[in-house]
Amino acid sequence: MIKAVVISVITVASAAAALADDAPVFSRPPDSCGTVQAPPLVAQKPIFAPGVQRVIHLNKNGGMYNLANAPTDSAQNVANARIVSQRGTGMIMIAPLEAGFDYNQVRECVINHYKPYNVRIVETQPKGEHIEAVVGGNGTELGFPSGALFGIASADNFCGVTETGIAFTFSRTHTNVPRKNEELCATIAHEVGHLLALEHEVTPIDLMSYVLIAQSNTKTFVNGNAQCGVDPQSTNPCSCSSGTTNSGARLGQFVGARPAETNPPSLTVKDLKDGGKIPPAFTIVAEASDAEGMADVLVYVDGTEIGHSAQPEGKTYKISGSATEGQHMLSVVARDLAGNLTKKDFNLTFAKLATGDSCIDNGACEGNICAQTTDGNYCTQSCDVNADTCPEDFACDGRLNACILTTGGCCSANGDATGSFLLALALGGLVLRRRRR
Ligand SMILES: [Zn+2]
């Protein structure tokens, strides 16, 4: 059965082989999805307790993926070659999503399709177990001819949840499709659907059919019994249930419903004020809580997620990130399990810290040295003891070749090699003394 399905994919792929590699042309009917419609190739136990919210990493930035004869593992970017590859094993690169798509529209659309269900979308790599939805490329990366596939899911546990699955959506195949942003969204939702226990069904408006949104006009996971197949003219027996299937009901069964309360979480952001200054490499510290359950805290720079955390210490979330120097809008968002958001915006100047400013690491400082002292950490800079190039209230220490606060005491430094000599001297027991004034 598996073999037969694979052969049909190859046939469709061959029909599309004439398409120029660099100019994907949309033509129906290519199979829009290469996912093998068969029960699990690899038994995978659900690793989440009932009610735990699953995480989907929506990745528009591409990356390197390892096609291996091994279970799919989103954390390691390993896809199961037996399921998704027409070229055997090896490393492949998926390009980032092309310009020309309205990514914000696509993202909001995907979030909306999954809103009723107990999943949340993040756009930066999660620390915990998750499903990945990578959006980019044209399918040739996996050995399919360009334009042959809209997407394919590395669904080791087809008919159940592939907890660490990877869903590939080939954006370039959508380039010339009518209503391409909605269709791209529909493919992402469809391929993720395969990782969440869904198989193809014929209902035109269902996300698990092949019917284009230009023809069905709208798409959703329908809660209603449907014949398996890809469109009303192309039916097949169901693989995952007897008789009919039902995408909406199966998501309810395998994923569960999202909590429905509407109280937003509380959020306090530490050490940031609107109009303030922040180093280009930074760590945001926020306290967030929600009576009905927190999901995560996310940090955005100019609307792009640059990091998130779902692993607080108590109520404290720490998210590290970086941005180019200059003016940016930094937003911190607390999100609860129901999807309620509390957002704080800060217009900030991203610039390295001046000598004397308090710091956490060397990279935050203009002088690239964050000195540790018994009175706290401060930025400093290297100097020439003969030229006296240090700012006021600082003196050049000839042994360290660094400016030292004249009111400071013993000194060491944080982190990398730039500062390690300071640390080494401090460990040697040297005490810095006032040299000026
Ligand atoms: Zn499919």
Image (cartoon, rainbow, N blue to C red):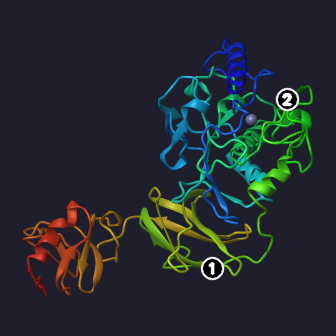
Circles 1 and 2: CB atoms closer than 8 Å: no
Tell me where residue 323 appears, x and y as whole percent.
47, 57
Residue type pointed to by label 2: Asn
Q: Quadrant of residue 294?
A: bottom right
Q: Nearer the viewer, residue 218 or 99?
A: 218
| In this rendering, position of residue 13 left or right of residue 89 | right
Tell me where residue 275 appears, x and y as whole percent.
54, 73
Disc 2 residue crowd, few under 14, some 14–19, many 20+, Cα 10 Å: some
Q: Nearer the viewer, residue 253 or 28?
A: 253
Which residue corresponds to mark 2?
Answer: 236
Q: On the rendered image, what quadrant is the N terminus found in?
A: top right
Which residue corresponds to mark 1?
Answer: 289
Tell me where residue 175 appears, x and y as whole percent.
71, 30
Q: Nearer the viewer, residue 88 or 113?
A: 88
What separation in Å lies between label 1 and label 2 (alpha carbons)? 48 Å
Q: Residue at x 61, y 68 (%)?
A: 296
- Labelled disc at residue 203: none
Tell me where residue 151 appears, x and y as whole percent.
68, 33
Secondary-structure class at tag 2: loop
